[in-house]
Image: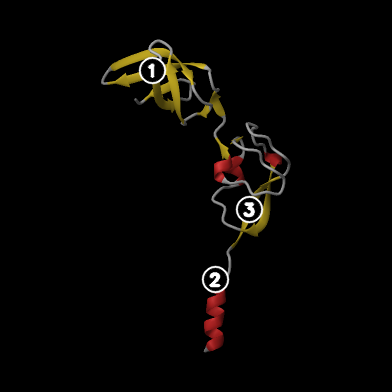
Amino acid sequence: MRFLAFLLYMITTAPASADVIVASRTIRAQEILGPTDLLLKPGEGSSDLSLHDLIGQEARVALYPGRIVRAVDVGPPTAIERNQIVPLIYARGGVQIITEGRSLMRAGIGDYVRAMNLTSRATVSGHVAPNGSILVSQ
């Protein structure tokens, strides 16, 4: 009976073995990941990412060979750069206001970003649209 209890303990406390994704070379921040940049390596850990999810993403930080690539280390490719002039679009209840603004940070499509309205100098926030404009939320 003790052996059965010990076996059950070992099965439930043993770390799960899963494949992890590692960088195959040094990848600088702001580089787009390609199929040759990543490797699937057997190891211990949990990976909620797949190789397919990472290809085409942009490295947010430097990735070093053999180190695990985490979800926070990558993101969508940059659609707007810091200090870039972009259209600001505010639409509510049938009224649409479009003006120019200056992006205060780099951001990809769907990212939440702050921008300065060039007319009023007010700082507004919104999400980056696929066409590179910012849909203002406040």
Q: Amino acid at mark 2?
A: Thr
N-term-proximal mark, 1 vs 3: 3
Q: Residue at x 58, y 66 (%)?
A: 15
Query: Which label belongs to residue 20?
Result: 3
- Crowding around mark 1 (Cα neighbors within 10 Å: few <14, some 14 to 19, many 20+) is few
Q: Residue furthest bottom?
A: 1
N-term-proximal mark, 2 vs 1: 2
Q: Write down the quadrant of residue 54 in the picture.
A: top right
Look at the numbered disc 2 and give the secondary structure of its residue: helix
Placement of 105 over or under 26, stated as above or below: above
Q: Amino acid at mark 1?
A: Ala
Tag 2–tag 1 contact (CB < 8 Å): no
Whole-Å distance between the Cαs marked 2 and 3? 20 Å
What percent of the width, then of the height, locates residue 83?
53, 18
Return the residue at label 1.
122
Query: Which label belongs to residue 87?
Result: none
Placement of 82 over or under 25, stated as above or below: above
Look at the numbered disc 3 and give the secondary structure of its residue: strand
Whole-Å distance between the Cαs marked 1 and 3? 45 Å
Q: Write down the quadrant of residue 32 in the picture.
A: top right
Q: Amino acid at mark 3?
A: Val
Q: Residue at x 66, y 41 (%)?
A: 63
Tag 2–tag 3 contact (CB < 8 Å): no
| Front: mark 1 or 3 | 1
In the foreground, 97 or 54: 97
Return the residue at label 2.
13
What percent of the width, then of the height, locates residue 24?
72, 44
